[in-house]
Amino acid sequence: MDDGPERQLNIHMEPALLAGVYSNFANITFSDYEFTLTFARIDHEVEEGDVPGVVVARVNMSQQFMRELLAAMQDAYSKYTTVKGIQDLPETNDHP
């Protein structure tokens, strides 16, 4: 089966978005139709009362995209742990 010519993504990003946002908290909710990921920055240094935080991004996605995102994240984390594990190996000066 011929799927036609290979296609490449051509994604544009506004310069204001290049820095991204920092998040140290995420909440995941879902319905029959979609998943919603809400990312926030939480101030964990507050010792009493409510913990303040601010939502920095919210992403709604289909169930199919969530499944693909989860697989991509698992793959990336597996690669990260492999590289990190290699970097953390002790160096030896043993030469035969």
Image: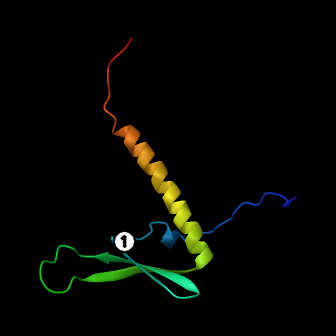
In the image, is 17 to the left or to the right of 26?
Answer: right
**Residue assigned mark 1:** 23
> Residue 85: image x %, image y %?
38, 42
**Residue type, mark 1 in image:** Ser
Is 66 on the left or on the right of 92, as rendered?
Answer: right
Relative to 47, is 37 on the left or the right? right
Please, is residue 78 above or below residue 57 in the view? above
Q: Identify the residue at horizontal 24%, vertical 83% (top origin).
A: 52
Which residue is drawn at the image coordinates 21% and 73% (left, top)?
44
Q: Of 90 and 56, which appears nearest the observer?
A: 90
Q: State the image quarter where residue 8 is shown.
A: bottom right
Q: Is residue 74 above or below residue 44?
A: above
Where 20 falls versus 60 (above or below)? above
Q: Residue 43: image x %, image y %? A: 23, 76
Give the residue at x 34% y 35%: 89
Residue at left 55%, top 61%?
72
Q: Given the current orientation, which residue lies at the most extreme left position?
A: 48
Label 1, residues with CA under 10 Å away: few <14, some 14-19, many ≥20 = some
Work out which residue is located at the far front of the displayed protein and give it: 32
Q: Is residue 65 above or below residue 30?
A: above
**Quadrant in the picture for the N terminus:** bottom right
Q: Is residue 42 left or right of residue 21?
A: left
Question: Which residue of the protein is positioned furthest toward the top in this rendering?
Answer: 96
Q: Quadrant of residue 12?
A: bottom right
Mark 1, secondary structure of its residue: loop
